[in-house]
Image: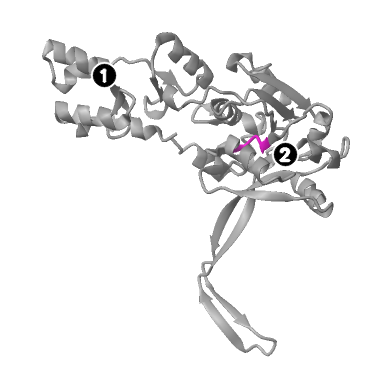
Amino acid sequence: MDYKKYCHKLSKLKTFDDILIALEQTGIGSLVVVDDDFILVGVITDGDIRRALLKKETDISSIINYYPEIWLDTQARQAGINHMKKIHRNILPILNQDKKVIDILCLDEISFDTVSNPVIIMAGGLGTRLHPLTKDTPKPMLPVNGKPILERIIEKLINQGFQQFYISINYLGEQIKEYFQDGAKWDVSIQYLEETKRLGTAGALYQLKNTISEPFIVMNGDIITDLNFRDLLDFRKTTNSLSTMCIYKQVHQVPFGVVEFDDLKKMVSIKEKPKNEYYVSMGIYAISPESLQYIPENEFYDMPTLFQNILDSDKFVNVYLFDGLWNDIGRVEDYKSANLLN
């Protein structure tokens, strides 16, 4: 959801008509007013407009509700949704510690129909490339704008209707279990796949071999994305693929002129700073239960190996090309850039 479409800068609200036009553009009868840095100023609703007209007070300062209901980005989104229902609000600004609006909960855009497909989140890695940040904290629990990466992942999936989660844990896994417990705080079910040794990005799935009977999502626990996971599941189903891998285009530009020559050292061509394009795995997959038969018991086994083994068996697997937000937090610079996202 593009939350900024529900926001309007105070500097652009000069007249009463400006407010009416801005409210009409949101289409939900509510408007979040911010300053030029997106710091919350207040909220205006249709009700505020009606009261202003009755009182014949149509100056902007008398219309804005400067103390609206807000939610903090450190609080569970599902709890925020429940709060909105309780107080009969359609919109709820989410603020960071600097009172900046970084998201908005809007009941009109939240899907309340749930899906039964499970989600497995791989959260057992060592996070070696993020040392020393991961010395005492598992990578999925590193905070992004004040909230653990893993919590952001789970809340994104909850907002899309997912209710059943499995989290694969190993390194410092007790911290994850202590934080999320059984998922009751988010009104979902969370169970744990505990690895006694490192099993790679797919090895822990063996534990679900006789448990899961429908297609499921598998993803790494260090990803920030706006992917629609339900669309991914629908794509796998409609294409009749055994399993589907999400891929993302990466472009690398060589900062020099690239020279090609033959065996006689004769120059064939020179290309100035060429761009090379690759498609990489996003660490997100839609997997069929049948695929679990390829996974060995208690052995290190990665997702690329699973897909290769399925291909080697002449079974159909495909890819889902995604071009939206995808931030794989594998390195310190990735972590820093993730914290710059609104």
Question: Measuring 55% from the left and 61% from the top, which residue is drawn there?
Answer: 252
Q: Quadrant of residue 33?
A: top left
Local SS, label 1: helix
Could you say which disc has been placed on residue 22 in the image? none
| Amino acid type of the residue that numbered disc 2 sits on in the rendered structure | Ile
Q: Quadrant of residue 168?
A: top right
Q: Assess whether residue 311 is covered by the magenta stretch.
A: no
Q: Which residues are magenta?
A: 218-223
Above-or-below relation of 150 to 47? below
Residue at numbered disc 2 = 287
In what quadrant of the picture does the N terminus appear? top left
Question: Measuring 34% from the left and 30% from the top, which residue is drawn there?
Answer: 6
Percent x, y of residue 143: 55, 29
- Residue 164 in the figure: left or right of residue 292: left
Residue at numbered disc 1 = 46
| Amino acid type of the residue that numbered disc 1 sits on in the rendered structure | Asp
